[in-house]
Image (tube, rainbow, N blue to C red):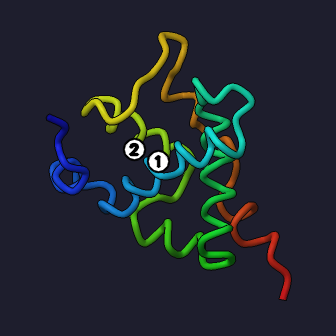
Amino acid sequence: MKTPLEQIAGRDGRYSPQAIKFVYEALGYTAKNVAKEPRHVSGQTLCEGLRRLAIEKWGRLAILVLNMWGVKTTRDFGEIVYLMIKHKWMSAQPTDSIDDFHDVYDFKTVFKDQFKF
């Protein structure tokens, strides 16, 4: 039996349960709407799906929501993914690495600067 996401978040302490649930939701969203090969989603592709889903859900508030949950960089997305891999909620290929999530994009650029007032 899988450890509930709330327990994973509580034990880890870095991210809110909502952040972990969002990353899990975004995996399905990405496989359906972004990935060319839905059977395997790369770190960079998942980051793109996470970006799109966050903007779809929260618009210009996306950066505030993510930051409130402890997510400030694409590396944080990777940390959550690898936390979920550790607890059998996701899986990885041998060629996958946490470094696939390093500096994929800048949060301020994609979640703030694109919105003009």
Report x, y in % for residue 41: 60, 30
Report x, y in % for residue 23: 46, 50
Pick out the residue farthest to the right: 116
- Residue closest to the eye, 16 or 87: 87
Secondary element under disc 1, as helix, strand or loop, is helix
Q: Which residue is mark 2?
A: 80
Q: Amino acid at mark 1?
A: Asp
Pick out the residue farthest to the top: 94
> Label for residue 27?
none
Q: Residues within 10 Å of mark 1 (few under 14, many from 20)?
A: some
Secondary element under disc 2, as helix, strand or loop, is helix
Report x, y in % for residue 101: 57, 36
Q: Give the residue displayed 72% in from the left and 42% down from the top.
A: 34
- Residue closest to the eye, 24 or 80: 24
Report x, y in % for residue 83: 32, 37
Q: Quadrant of residue 14?
A: bottom left
User: In the image, is 44 to the left or to the right of 27?
Assistant: right
User: In the image, is 53 to the left or to the right of 1?
Assistant: right
Q: Give the residue displayed 62% in from the left and 44% down from the top.
A: 30
Q: What whole-number distance in Å separates the C-alpha atoms at marks 1 and 2?
A: 6 Å
Q: Do callouts 1 and 2 mark residues in contact (Cβ within 8 Å)?
A: yes
Q: Give the residue displayed 60% in from the left and 52% down from the top.
A: 50
Q: Give the residue displayed 50% in from the left and 66% down from the top.
A: 66
For the N terminus, which image quadrant?
top left
Pick out the residue farthest to the front: 32
- Residue closest to the eye, 72 or 37: 37
Q: Which residue is mark 1?
A: 76
